[in-house]
Image (cartoon, rainbow, N blue to C red):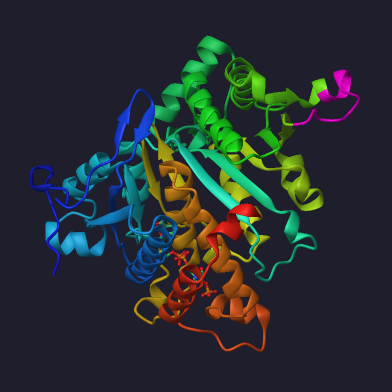
Amino acid sequence: MVSHPCTADEVKPPSEGRLAKFENGKLIVPDNLIVAYFKGDGIGPEIVESAKRVLDAAVDKAYGGSRRIVWWEVTAGEEAQKECNSLLPDGTLQAFKMARVNLKGPLTTPVGGGFRSLNVTLRMVLDLYSNVRPVKWYGQPTPHCHPEKIDWVIFRENTEDVYAGIEWQFDSAEAQKLRDFLKKELGIELTPDTGIGIKPISKWRTQRHVRRAMEWAIRNGYKHVTIMHKGNIMKYTEGAFRQWAYDLILSEFRDYVVTEDEVNTKYGGKTPEGKIIVNDRIADNMMQQIITRPGDYNVIVTPNLNGDYISDEANALVGGIGMAAGLDMGDGVAVAEPVHGSAPKYAGKNVINPTAEILSGMYLLSDFVGWSEVRLLVEYAVRQAIAHKQVTYDLAREMGGITPISTTEYTDVLVGYIRHADLKALKGQ
Ligand code: NAP
């Protein structure tokens, strides 16, 4: 049995690997990279094991032994509660801080008042300010007529907006104080049965988030970056987000971009070759535009609440939660995590779809670490498996008339496709 560090003092990285470093705003990655991870609750152990096997196979195929992952297991959730008497031990937080490159399984959120989600705690402690949700179609069943046009990356701000948790119940002393203040100082009268929440959106948090989104767009050769906001109504929060996003993009990325206005006024409606078109859309319009004009969007950068809504809508269009990958990023630190939860009813049954966890790890390695070949191989394997109808129960249910394969069989299938892939040909595509 692996013994996990419970306290920060007990943390010791594996001696056969080296930790990534963060210097002058750049991640420095060794060839024997330590990746910290915990399996989490419910289906977590099965999908994390699957992801590790697939990612190891991809790294091995891509770099023929010259690069490898040294996995560093720590603990969280129910297992950690038993071992360390804490659902998220200090040892785990410390290991994630040190490793910088991290993967996690889903955690069950205990039900009960006053309990802060472990995922929220992790994001706050590591200051993982951008939640990245890539949405892509790999051939799985979809309700969309043109799924081949879907290639979106939703950049959801992770630390502020109404999610900051600044709110008071209507009958609390604090709500009363605020209502009194608003009435006395600002002439705004609210009825005594009014609860109050605050929506903070700041310039520097907006801009560090937008910077990450732009870097992602440039690295991946995307053609569109769209600022999604509700600034027509919430002028000094969402409207300011829009303005600060444009300001940052036009000051730091001017050479890469052209605005939609410029395309219309200077370039006769045609985006100049090699430029990213930057535009903005009001949130409600954006929600329908991704359905009606899927090919007109790539990176969508937005505050927290909009990001929550649109990423669920977007994922529903490409086969649902078993395929929905996620990556939380901060400065020189990232945690890969699928969008879905611990699905306790499937725990230990070896039936669940591990693709979301696998794709999350893939983006961690390709986009955060910079091992881009991993993505070519993993995406190829997933596409092949779906094309040959080698899928788990969730996709089999949608495809109809197919016998699903187990989580471990599906993992074997992906590893097989990776081992036999022609990487050169994939690079040329
Ligand atoms: P869930 O775990 O996401 O599962 C809900 C349903 O989604 C499952 O019953 C299954 O639907 C489908 N599903 C989820 N993962 C799947 C996968 N890998 N492959 C195929 N289908 C999948 O949501 P929940 O049951 O509401 O939440 C369970 C626990 O997880 C809660 O404690 C919640 O707080 C927690 N949670 C954690 C995270 C996280 O750690 N990031 C995120 C969300 C929720 P069918 O039964 O229809 O097939």
Task: Please indicate, yes or no, whether residue 113 appears anywhere in the rendered image.
Answer: no
Image coordinates of residue 20 in percent, x first then y, are 29, 40
When the figure is inspected, residue 255 is found, relative to residue 354, above or below; the finding is: above
Q: Nearer the viewer, residue 89 or 69?
A: 69
Outermost residue toward the left in this view: 9
Quadrant hosting residue 302:
top right
Image coordinates of residue 164 in percent, x first then y, are 43, 34
Q: Nearer the viewer, residue 110 or 272?
A: 272
What's the residue at 23%, 40% (across, down)? 98
Residue 216 in magenta stretch: no
When the figure is inspected, residue 178 is found, relative to residue 285, above or below; the finding is: above
Tell me which segment is drawn in magenta. Answer: 263-273
Image coordinates of residue 45 in percent, x first then y, are 32, 69
**Quadrant containing the N terminus in the rendered view:** bottom left
**Quadrant containing the C terminus in the rendered view:** bottom right
Number of numbered discs visible in the structure rendering: 0
Task: Please indicate, yes or no, whether residue 226 appears anywhere in the rendered image.
Answer: yes
Q: Nearer the viewer, residue 13 or 108?
A: 13
Quadrant hosting residue 323:
bottom right
Image coordinates of residue 329 in percent, x first then y, are 42, 39
Residue 264 in magenta stretch: yes
Q: Is residue 310 left or right of residue 284?
A: left
What's the residue at 55%, 64% (across, down)? 422
When the figure is inspected, residue 55 is found, relative to residue 189, above or below; the finding is: below
